[in-house]
Amino acid sequence: MAKDKTELVQELMSKQDHIRNIGIVAHIDHGKTTLTDNLLAGAGMISHEHAGHQLAMDFDKQEQERGITIFSANVSMVHEYGDKNFLINLIDTPGHVDFGGDVTRAMRAVDGVLVLADAVEGVMPQTETVIRQALKERVKPILFINKVDRLIKELKLTPEQMQERFLKIITEVGLLFRKYGEEKYKDEWTINVNDGSVAFGSAVKNWAISIPLMQKAGISFKDIIEYSEQGREKELAEKAPLHRVVLDMVIKHLPNPLEAQKYRIEKIWPGEIDSDIGKDMTSCNIGGKLAGVVTKIYPDPHAGFVATVRLFSGKIEKGQDVYLISKQKKEKVQQVAVYRGQQRVVMDEVVAGNIVGVVGLKDAGSGETICDPEHTITAFESITHIFEPVVTKAIEPKHPRDLAKFIELLKRTSREDPTLRVSINEDTGEYLVSGLGELHINAKIENKLKEMGIEASISSPIVIFKEGIKSITPKPVEGKSPNKHNRFYVVAEKLEDKVYEAMVRGDIPDQEVKKKDVALNDKLSDLGMDREETRKIKLIHNKCMLLDTTHGVNAILEIMEMVKQSFKEAMNEGPMAREPCAGIKVKLVDAKLHEDAIHRGPAQVIPAMRSAIREAIIKAQTYILEPRQIIRIDVPTDHMGGAIKEINNRRGQVIEMNDERGTTTIKCKMPVAEMFGFNSALKSATGGQGFFWLIDVVYEPLPKDLEQKVISQIKERKGIKDIKEEETDE
């Protein structure tokens, strides 16, 4: 966006049918950042000579050193289509699974995604993951098959074989759309090679082609092979420039904000759609009240924190007061800007339908809802990643003088990246940092500590287990308050399987449940939960439920907040090893309360209720669940034995195997506890030629013969004495 285009950008921001908010998503190393480089070059923002090598969107030092994208990066560019100019707000996202949280947050900001697939590798595990993430946020995908030059130069494929390869990739991507897409959009969003919603090309060689363009320009697959083999790729890039083909496809096949917000708002905002603000957002009303979501927070050495905000209604300008819903506080906007990668171009104002950089929101975190202070709104759905953190490290500064800086880093990082979770082990004083993988914690915390010159003791990776139950508490468990004036009767039972699965998918988020949440009641009832029970839910936390099934208990409403707090504490730390609980339904079936409120305060209610819940869980046959990763291993067939041996040595389970062109693909399930060091062990066992990728994370029962050993190890690590003694002390 050159300076002479700033006014054009400002003008286009108000023409909402001329805006496209898009993300580029793919498996790691499939060419997202190289493609973005070429789009920037086509928009005149970097030189064509450097495009594909400059990696303009990887501006963090770590990204340059590791050669991967770690942080999502924004850029706004102008593209001419037909005889009209369009504004494209683009987000380049990470491809490594450990940084998938950045992809999830970017999906809230955009309306469409360009999915990249490597022509040689095809659809990989992270390709599936990013499609799931997009469809979960009701974001429309299209497809670009990259690295076609490799099919020609390395694999020497004929035109017919190339078409077969493309058809296979298109079919697999189409199946994923159908697998994860909502019923209404499965057919509507089908990609079709003939209408141009699929393109092929080479980001590094700067050319792209689609069937409509081939027909229009008279270029065949045979011609493309000849251009490549004869080293005439520059000539091909002039006839079929990548930026022109890809951005034309984006404008033609991805929605503008006016179209997208009509169907996206009801998916991502739980408020009343027929309310004034609901109508403002669904119509993307520039003149409406302010409503937007912070999708990213990052520090700027000169401006402090910069918030990336997707505006759904109204407008935002310098000096304006905005209200942060979750923080319940007002803040003043110091600057608004549009992105040019690492730089920002300051604007007078930015209106609904755009992605904007805002300086001045000091306390906002990723996922924060912003609105007009005089017209507060229902908060947007929280932005939840499809995988939970499964790896934890205990980190402690070696020198007390560094503690304040260390705590500040943890606070800042958890604001920027909510998929990193921070807690304190109160027994040891260690800070526990949980992430999506070892690399996630290393890049976001450990590296930053080094940059700040803070020496820290860092533990080996710790696995987070969960506690579940097999049946139901035979009879209600009584919990007595310390003053013996209050009694609570609690039953625990296993959540219905389909309800728990919906929670894992993110269809039913953690929430305080309103008295008459008809939509939630209907959803749970359809999943097999008793309709009468659905009306008694008070709280969903940690994929567990609290129900109040009491009748005629005086003052029950007065103590309900304390009951909820007890439930949260019990679900955060279960009875066996103080690990989080999962898939449990807790019912408060009766209570006897002292008539005087002074005798039923938090010190009386919370310990009594918490201990009753924990005992009820034990009596419902509790057990330990361990996280297991479903992974894909690619290995040359003659080294397959080494890979299988590594899987078997780590309690792994082979799910399926396929052979193609001398490469064996193994899909298997591996306990996370056995995965540390797996990458180097796999390389060693396969002559350096084995690679693996994460497909999914599931929690399954730990083998019974390992349960006591694991519980003892967890207790020792946490410094937990006998849990019954601990409860008595409390």
Image (spheres, rainbow, N blue to C red):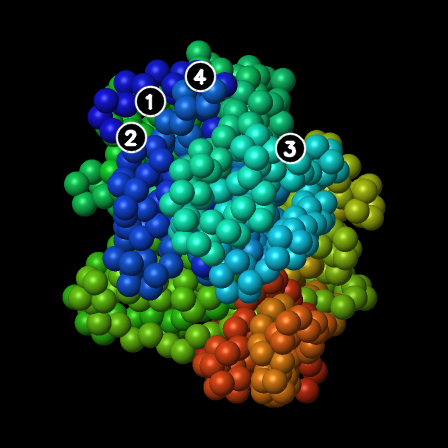
The span from disc 4 to disc 1 (Cα, nearest Å) is 16 Å
> Looking at the image, is 13 positioned above or below residue 600?
above
- Front one among 265 and 66: 66
The span from disc 1 to disc 2 (Cα, nearest Å) is 8 Å
Secondary structure beneath dot 2 equals loop
| Structural crowding at the residue carrying mark 3, measured as other residues with C-alpha within 10 Å and reported as few (<14), some (14–19) or many (≥20) | few
For residue 615, say whether it is visible: no
Secondary structure beneath dot 4 equals loop
For residue 171, say whether it is visible: yes
Under mark 4, the amino acid is Asp
Of callouts 4 and 1, which one flags the residue occurring earlier in the amino acid sequence? 1
Which residue is at a point 59% across and 73% down the rendered structure image?
633
Residue that mark 1 sits on: 9
- Front one among 558 and 524: 524
User: Contact, CB < 8 Å: mark 1 with mark 2?
Assistant: yes
Which label belongs to residue 521?
Answer: none
Of callouts 4 and 3, which one flags the residue occurring earlier in the amino acid sequence? 4
Q: Position of residue 505 (x, y in %)?
A: 65, 51
- Front one among 154 and 653: 154
> Looking at the image, is 566 positioned above or below residue 341?
below
The span from disc 3 to disc 1 (Cα, nearest Å) is 29 Å
Residue that mark 4 sits on: 83
Residue that mark 2 sits on: 1
Q: Position of residue 242 (x, y in %)?
A: 44, 40
> Looking at the image, is 514 positioned above or below residue 103?
above
